[in-house]
């Protein structure tokens, strides 16, 4: 039985969708059956745990994704679930894949997502002074807020004349405290 | 593998052709890492003919790339409208401190001599509309 069929059989309605997409198939599962989904994948031969990570969906919370594959990598799937923005938490996958512990530590550190049952969620990569959950989209990137954007200079405006339109750095949200050499004017 | 043996368009270091730079700021503004800094001033040439107009041009004062920040995406090279930036395959330019990775214009200009010729066109390619120096196929 394929990995996808195994998860479908084990979860029933708990498997919300299968995204064929362009890459590996993505199985969207309900968070309550996260561990069961991984167990079913492993039981069908997906013994190779590649990675577990998360991404920020804004108001919809966070998506947590695990990539697992059969040993010959003939079939590999992404198992994905969603957790809410307030106190996001999910059951640990370390009972199914011991190697997930490191990834859960990192995901906890970067996104502030808890993994119930993982006893080792202490900081892994960041210093104590680093901002909390820096990969959340509402986390201000200090390097972008503290440094003036070098592209703000206008080469034709060396005399300090008022310019028609202030150039703004692309990709930096408007509500960030953007530093600027001319912001006091 | 020596730099000369590396494949075409190897991303080693970025070379600046100062005479081609018009201080348009496109590379600075497109750089995702904010690793390019340009300073310039405007120089005005008085009109040479009666009722002519003064000409003003941007003159480059500083062009620096911080290779400690650079992620070698090549967007600056792609976006430059006058081909003032080029990939050089040279990669051994590390230094004892991070500030040694900030290459000012004089150092960036020296890399120009190491920029290889464009690779030869494929046999079935259409004729080159804008011939550049190319290495023999």
Image: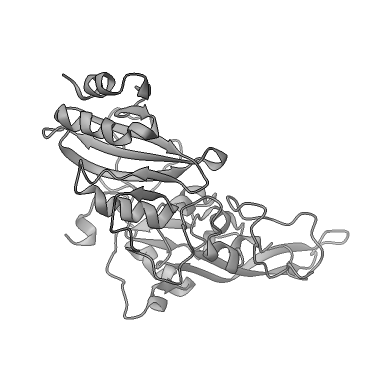
x, y percent for residue A13: 37, 19
> Which colour style is shown?
one colour
> Which quadrant of the figure has residue B92?
bottom left
The residue at the far front in this view is A117
The residue at the far left in this view is A72
Quadrant for the N terminus of chain B in the image: bottom left
The residue at the far right in this view is B51
Please report the residue visible at 53 percent of the width from the left and 52 percent of the height from the top.
B82
Residue A27 relative to residue A182: left or right = left
**Compared with residue B24, is residue B132 higher up or lower down, i.e. above or below?**
above
x, y percent for residue B104: 47, 73
Quadrant for the C terminus of chain B in the image: top left
Q: Would residue B66 be visible to someone looking at this image?
A: yes
**Compared with residue B103, is residue B20 higher up or lower down, i.e. above or below?**
above
A6, A184: nearer the viewer: A6
> Which quadrant of the figure has residue A19?
top left
x, y percent for residue B4: 23, 58
Please report the residue visible at 54 percent of the width from the left and 52 percent of the height from the top.
B30
Residue A49 relative to residue A169: left or right = left
**Compared with residue B133, is residue B46 higher up or lower down, i.e. above or below?**
below
B45, B37: nearer the viewer: B37
Please report the residue visible at 60 percent of the width from the left and 51 percent of the height from the top.
A170
x, y percent for residue A140: 56, 59
């Amino acid at each position: 039985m394929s990995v996808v069929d195994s998860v479908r059989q084990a979860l029933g309605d708990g498997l919300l969708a299968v995204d064929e997409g362009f890459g590996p198939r993505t199985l969207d599962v309900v968070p309550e059956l996260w561990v069961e989904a991984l167990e079913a994948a492993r039981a069908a031969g997906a013994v190779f745990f590649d990675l577990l990570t998360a991404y920020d969906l804004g108001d919809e919370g966070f998506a947590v994704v695990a990539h697992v594959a059969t040993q010959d990598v003939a079939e590999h799937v992404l198992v994905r679930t969603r957790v809410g923005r307030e106190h996001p938490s999910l059951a640990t996958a370390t009972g199914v894949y011991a190697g997930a512990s490191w990834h859960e530590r990192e995901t906890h550190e970067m996104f502030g997502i808890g993994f119930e049952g993982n006893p080792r969620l202490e900081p892994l990569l960041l210093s104590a002074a680093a901002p909390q959950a820096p990969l959340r989209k509402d986390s201000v990137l200090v390097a972008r807020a503290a440094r003036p954007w070098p592209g703000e200079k206008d080469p034709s405006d060396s005399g300090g004349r008022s310019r028609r339109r202030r150039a703004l750095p692309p990709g930096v949200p408007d509500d960030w405290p953007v530093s600027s050499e001319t912001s006091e004017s | 593998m020596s730099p000369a043996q590396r494949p075409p368009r190897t991303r080693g270091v970025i070379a600046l052709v100062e005479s081609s730079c018009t201080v348009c700021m496109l590379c600075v503004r497109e750089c995702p890492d904010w690793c390019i800094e340009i300073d310039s001033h405007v120089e005005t040439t008085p009109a040479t003919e009666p009722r002519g107009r003064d000409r003003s041009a941007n003159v480059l004062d500083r062009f620096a790339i911080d290779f400690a920040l650079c992620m070698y995406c090549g967007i600056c090279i792609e976006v430059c409208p006058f081909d003032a930036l080029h990939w050089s395959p040279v990669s051994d330019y590390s230094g004892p401190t991070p500030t040694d990775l900030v290459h000012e214009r004089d150092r960036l200009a020296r890399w120009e001599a190491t920029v290889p010729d464009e690779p030869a066109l494929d046999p079935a390619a259409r004729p080159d509309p804008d011939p550049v120096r190319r290495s023999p196929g």
